């Protein structure tokens, strides 16, 4: 995961492994769920989306798709969602179904599959084909599609205006995990070498990697592929820096 070395006050005592409170929106600004819907849509819109999901499953059930599955040693049995449909045809959907689903989704399926974004687009396309506005029809009238409502007037505006607050700067050295919401990962140390020593003794870093992390201010990502080698962004930080050095100098 991504890491970052931060300079914080020596007495900074935020709980390790927990999101720093400055990055967490206060409870009083958290809008409650809308009692009239689940995701900002009416139940009619949700039913339509469920049907669009089934429709976009059909390209993966054509004879060609079944043959691909068998060639890869997979079962070609029709998905139970489709196999259990009442009044379904006795044959698999023909290959021309891909033209229909691609038109609705705005792009063809990948290896027979459409994703959730395609289902979203297809739902909107069906609503538009009915002569309705997809930004109006099926949108919850209580919350306006937000799926949350205000507990008091002006709460949404206050929540939108809220900004995260980083920890105060200081003389201490601390490693943070920054994949997602940043969380402190080590105690605070007075010297950089003390942080290096902690990473080696308590977190299993090699000393060269720990020193590289502290010197460079952190690491990016989880894994790097360089020269055919799979390297950990933090535990192999020194090796990554060495392998990338000629590239950066060139």
Image (tube, helix red, strand yellow):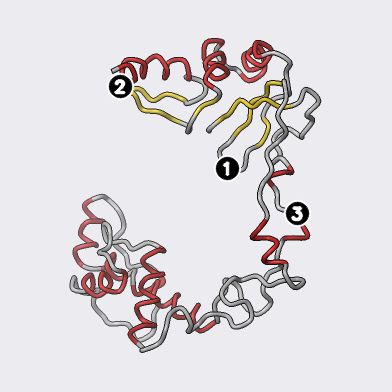
Residue 126 in the figure: left or right of residue 203: left
Q: Residues within 10 Å of mark 2 (few under 14, many from 20)?
A: few
Q: How many marks?
A: 3
Q: Secondary structure at mark 3?
A: loop
Residue receiving disc 2: 227
Q: Secondary structure at mark 1?
A: loop
Query: Picture coordinates of residue 180 (x, y %)?
Result: 57, 42
Picture residue at 26% right of the left edge, 80% below the top: 90
Asked where in the image residue 104 lies, by quadrant, the reply is bottom left
Whichever of callouts 3 and 2 sits on the residue coming sooner in the sequence is 3
Indicate which label's residue lies in the foreground, 3 or 1.
3
Whichever of callouts 3 and 1 sits on the residue coming sooner in the sequence is 3
Q: CA distance from mark 2 to mark 1?
A: 28 Å
Asked where in the image residue 12 lies, by quadrant, the reply is top right
In the depicted structure, whether residue 52 falls above or below residue 173: below
Give the numbered dot on residue 180: 1
In the depicted structure, whether residue 24 falls above or below residue 190: below
Q: Are marks 2 and 1 in contact (CB under 8 Å)?
A: no
Residue 134 in the figure: left or right of residue 151: left
In the depicted structure, whether residue 130 falls above or below residue 108: below
Residue receiving disc 3: 26
Indicate which label's residue lies in the foreground, 2 or 1.
1
Query: Picture coordinates of residue 125 (x, y %)?
Result: 35, 77
Whichever of callouts 2 and 1 sits on the residue coming sooner in the sequence is 1
Picture residue at 68% right of the left edge, 69% below the top: 33
Q: Are marks 3 and 1 in contact (CB under 8 Å)?
A: no
Picture residue at 73% right of the left edge, 18% below the top: 189
Q: CA distance from mark 3 to mark 2?
A: 46 Å
């Amino acid at each position: 995961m991504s890491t970052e070395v931060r300079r914080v006050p020596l007495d900074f005592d935020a709980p390790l492994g927990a999101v720093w409170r400055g990055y967490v929106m206060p409870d009083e600004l958290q809008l409650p769920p809308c009692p009239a819907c689940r995701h900002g849509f009416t139940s009619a819109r949700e039913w339509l989306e469920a049907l669009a999901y089934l429709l976009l499953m059909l390209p993966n059930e054509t004879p060609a798709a079944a043959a691909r599955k068998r060639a890869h040693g997979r079962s070609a049995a029709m998905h139970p969602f489709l196999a259990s449909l009442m009044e379904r045809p006795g044959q698999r959907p023909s290959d021309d179904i891909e033209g229909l689903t691609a038109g609705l989704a705005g792009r063809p399926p990948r290896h027979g599959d459409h994703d959730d974004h395609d289902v979203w687009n297809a739902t909107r396309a069906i609503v538009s084909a009915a002569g309705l506005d997809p930004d109006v029809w099926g949108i919850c009238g209580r919350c306006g599609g937000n799926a949350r409502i205000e507990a008091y007037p002006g709460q949404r505006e206050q929540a939108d205006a809220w900004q995260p607050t980083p920890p105060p700067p200081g003389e201490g050295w601390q490693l943070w995990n920054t994949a997602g919401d940043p969380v402190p990962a080590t105690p605070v140390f007075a010297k950089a070498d003390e942080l290096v020593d902690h990473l080696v003794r308590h977190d299993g870093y090699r000393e060269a990697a720990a020193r590289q992390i502290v010197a460079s201010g952190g690491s990016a990502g989880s894994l790097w592929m360089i020269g055919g080698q799979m390297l950990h962004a933090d535990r192999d930080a020194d090796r990554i820096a060495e392998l990338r050095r000629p590239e950066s100098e060139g």
